[in-house]
Amino acid sequence: MVVNTMNSGDGRKTVITFGTFDVFHVGHLRIFERALSFGDRLVVGISTDALSISKKGRPPVCSQDERSAIVAALRCVDEVFWEESLEEKAQYIRRYNADVLVMGDDWAGKFDELSDLCEVKYLPRTPAISTTEIIEKIQVEF
Ligand code: C2G
C-alpha cells in the first residue's frame, strides 16, 4: 500500500535510511543521493557501535561519533540520529515523520511490513565497492 500524503505536515517529503557507513565510500554516497531523489529532505539513522558489532560481528573501524560526523557534514543529508536497534524502525519513521524508507537491495523485503507507515524502496547497491573489500585491500596491499 503506498502512502501518498506528506507525513511531515510542512509539505516537504522526508526520506529516511539507515546504516553503519564505516570507512565511508562512494557506495554510501550514492545511496544518499538516490534516496534524496524521492523527497525533499534526508534523515539518516547511524548504527551505534554496539548495533554494528551485533550486525557485522566486529567493531567498526570508525567510531559512531566519527561516522555520524562524516554523514552529517554531507550536503545531501539534513539530519542524523542514532540507530540503536534494527527492530525500532517504526518508531524512527514516526519520530522523523518519514514518507519514504530507502535501503539497499541487500535488505530487499526485510522492511515490507513498514509499508503501512511509509513508502518502502530497495535500491540496487553500487557494484564493486564495500567496506569489507576496502579493509581486505588495505590488509593485502599495505
Ligand atoms: N550500500 C550500497 N552500495 C554499496 C555498499 C552499501 O548501496 N556498495 C548501501 C547498503 O545497501 C545500505 C547502506 O549503503 O543501504 C549502508 O550500508 P552499511 O553501512 O553496510 O549498513 P548496513 O549494515 O546495511 O545497515 O537498519 C538497517 C541497517 O542499519 C543497515
Image (cartoon, grey):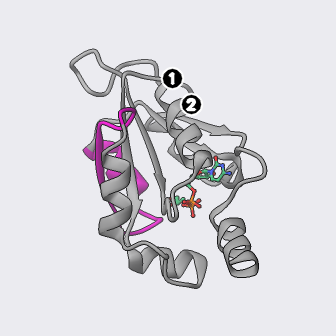
**Residue 112 visible in rendering:** no
Figure check: 98 above or below 82? above
Q: CA distance from mark 1 to mark 2?
A: 5 Å
Residue type at numbered disc 2: Arg
Residue at the image position 30 percent from the left and 49 percent from the top: 80
Q: Quadrant of residue 40?
A: top left
Ligand 1 within 8 angstroms of badge 2 C-beta: no
Q: Position of residue 139 (x, y in %)?
A: 69, 81
Q: Position of residue 90 (x, y in %)?
A: 40, 51
Residue at the image position 47 percent from the left and 53 percent from the top: 18
| CB under 8 Å between discs 1 and 2 | yes
Residue type at numbered disc 1: Ser
Residue at the image position 45 percent from the left and 64 percent from the top: 87
Q: Is residue 113 left or right of residue 87?
A: right
Q: Nearer the viewer, residue 133 or 98?
A: 133
Figure check: 67 above or below 112? below
Q: Position of residue 8 (x, y in %)?
A: 26, 27
Residues shaded magenta: 75-95
* Residue bearing the label numbered 1: 37
Figure check: 125 above or below 41? below
For the residue carrying disc 1, how many other residues have a C-alpha within 10 Å: few (<14), some (14-19), or many (20+)?
Answer: few
Residue 44 lies in magenta, yes or no?
Answer: no
Specify the quarter for ligand 1: bottom right
Q: Position of residue 35 (x, y in %)?
A: 52, 33
Figure check: 99 above or below 57? above
The kind of secondary structure element at disc 2 is: helix
Residue located farthest toward the bottom when viewing the structure as drawn = 58
Say which quadrant the N terminus sits in: top right
For the residue carrying disc 2, how many other residues have a C-alpha within 10 Å: few (<14), some (14-19), or many (20+)?
Answer: few
* Residue bearing the label numbered 2: 34
Q: Is residue 128 left or right of residue 87?
A: right
